[in-house]
Amino acid sequence: MLYCPKCRAICDNAARCPNCRNTKLRPVDPEDMVLLHSADLYTAQQVWERLSQEGIACKMEDFSSGPASYFYDSQVMPTDKSLFVPYRQLEEARVLSAQVGREVEREMEPGPAEPPGPMRIVGEILSVVLFLLLIMAAVFGADAAANWLKGLFT
């Protein structure tokens, strides 16, 4: 395994870093802080807290490098964070990060929809009726204007 000191990513014996295209790679040291992953602010905070609870040293920094660009990837937000852990604890951190990721996904799932209340149903019916009346007024108004113009020229 090789380490890219520029973006702190692990490279699989490549000539260039796949993230930043750096060619100055070196063998990874167990104490090197390596990129775990980048995530949105909420998820990154949850992962950082879990890693800290488990005694894994973790650094959280603003997202600044990697294959994604703010200009080309609409999924990347300026508030995204990158998480770094020591290489010797990378596998354990990946397992914990995956667990937190699943927990965050479950949190974000929408719950069962509540049935609309009677006031909401009345409001929706009233909105539809008013919309139809507005359409009828526009049609009859345009017809009356056309007949008036027609009467001027005949």
Image: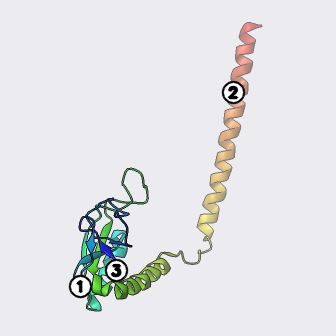
Using the image as rendered, state which of residue 154 and residue 40 is in the foreground: 40
- Residue 55 position (above or below residue 111): below
Q: Are marks 1 and 2 in contact (CB under 8 Å)?
A: no
Q: Amino acid at mark 2?
A: Ala
Residue 46, which numbered label? 3
Q: Identify residue for label 1.
A: 57
Pair 1/2: label in front: 1
Left or right: 92 as drawn, with respect to 145: left
Q: CA distance from mark 1 to mark 3?
A: 14 Å
Residue 25, which numbered label? none
Q: Amino acid at mark 1?
A: Ala
Q: Identify residue for label 2.
A: 142
Q: Secondary structure at mark 1?
A: loop
Left or right: 132 as drawn, with respect to 22: right
Q: Residue at x 38, y 50 (%)?
A: 71
Pair 1/3: label in front: 1
Q: Secondary structure at mark 3?
A: helix
Q: Are marks 1 and 3 in contact (CB under 8 Å)?
A: no
- Residue 122 position (above or below residue 142): below
Q: Position of residue 142 (x, y in %)?
A: 69, 27
Residue pushed farthest top?
154
Using the image as rendered, state which of residue 113 and residue 18 is in the foreground: 18
Q: Position of residue 51 (x, y in %)?
A: 30, 86
Label 3 CA crowd tier, 10 Å (few <14, some 14–19, many 20+): some
